[in-house]
Image (cartoon, rainbow, N blue to C red):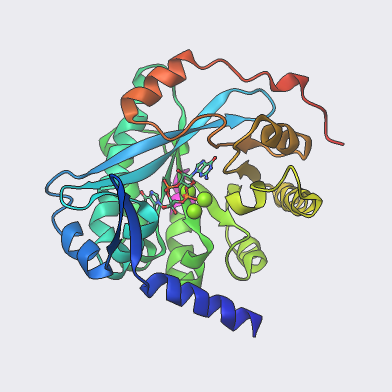
Amino acid sequence: AAESAVHLAKDMGRNSVAFFQSGHQNDRLSRYRIASELHHALEHEEFSLVYQPQIDLVTGALVGAEALLRWHSESLGPVSPDQFIPVAEDTGMMDDIGVWVLGQAVQEAARWSRQGMPLKMSINVSARQFQRSEVASQVMAALHQHQVAPEQLVVELTETSFMHSAAATERELASLRDEGVRVAIDDFGTGYSSLSYIREMSLDYLKVDRSFIEQIEQSETDRKLVRAMIDMSHAMGLSVIAEGAETEADLTILKALGCDQAQGYYIARPMSAADFSRWANEYRPLPLAAMPERE
Ligand code: C2E
Ligand code: MG
Ligand code: MG
Ligand code: MG
């Protein structure tokens, strides 16, 4: 019963009316409205990428960034990815948008390397992209075109990708990893049957979902859960990245629990490419050395 309730809630979420903030009023946007405006978003150049830094919790050093998609619609204003990406997926538009994201992110990674800053670039790839297109060959083509080493790229995917078409996803992932591209499982702990996928898929990183970090200061249960995820990941040879670190205490606790890397508003919000480069140039490792060792 509990499980079907979760399914129901997810289905309702997907089909319900979306909200977004525009100026001073709250507007209701139908999926239809989003879909019709999305149609010309690519050709009107309404998309952009922002980059959120990821740091190493042992050294405090900047190690990479996650590319996050933004859409500023001419008629709708800014629409959040949680609203438009599901629509783009359902209408088949995510394939083309995904190719655009890949090209932009890989080009930016090449620029970082030329600036002497060969940071890891993480991109999000949605379940539908794995189902319908040849993700691995698209990725390899982009890396080749911009002369970026496969090892510099991390492909993030959620557990839902495995749910929808396990065989196709597994095949694409295996060929990406054969080429040296890294793979991360995103939003870990929020999907279904997490552990069986961890067992079957070959992965490099596990990203602990933000919902487990939100209360980490107050909740001993959440600290225990995160520690268990970290220990399990390490036993499987995976590195752990925590998302949504919003306070210094979050970082202190994550480091004490043995977490490898973190990203979150406390370190920095996602930034435009230009702002990210400036920020990265000025970044000095956060003084994590003073933090307590694992208890
Ligand atoms: P995600 O991949 O789990 O990305 C992390 C989300 O957490 C981002 O939301 C980021 O802005 C937000 N975040 C980061 N640090 C903090 C923090 O400290 N506190 C809070 N409250 N939030 C934080 P965003 O950018 O709105 O993206 C939402 C989701 O949309 C992403 O979740 C990802 O699943 C999807 N997405 C974004 N860009 C792309 C893309 O290019 N392709 C695909 N397929 N999906 C994307
Ligand atoms: Mg992600
Ligand atoms: Mg995530
Ligand atoms: Mg997410």
Q: Quadrant of the N terminus?
A: bottom right
Q: Is residue 46 visible?
A: yes
Q: Nearer the viewer, residue 255 or 82?
A: 82
Q: Left of 47 or right of it: where is 128?
A: right
Q: Quadrant of residue 274?
A: top left
Query: Would you place residue 164 above or below residue 154 in this image?
Result: below
Percent position (x, y) of residue 179? 44, 46
Q: Is residue 288 left or right of residue 103?
A: right
Looking at this view, name the residue that lies furthest to the right: 295
With respect to residue 179, does 272 lie above or below?
above
Q: Residue furthest bottom?
A: 1
Q: Examine the rendering and report whether any part of residue 85 can be seen.
A: no
Identity of the residue drawn at 31% across and 70% down: 90
Quadrant hosting residue 277? top left
Viewport quadrant of the C terminus: top right
Q: Nearer the viewer, residue 62 or 135?
A: 62
Our reading of the magenta stretch's main secondary structure is: helix
Report the span colored magenta.
Answer: 176-181
Coordinates of residue 162 in the picture (x, y in percent): 50, 67
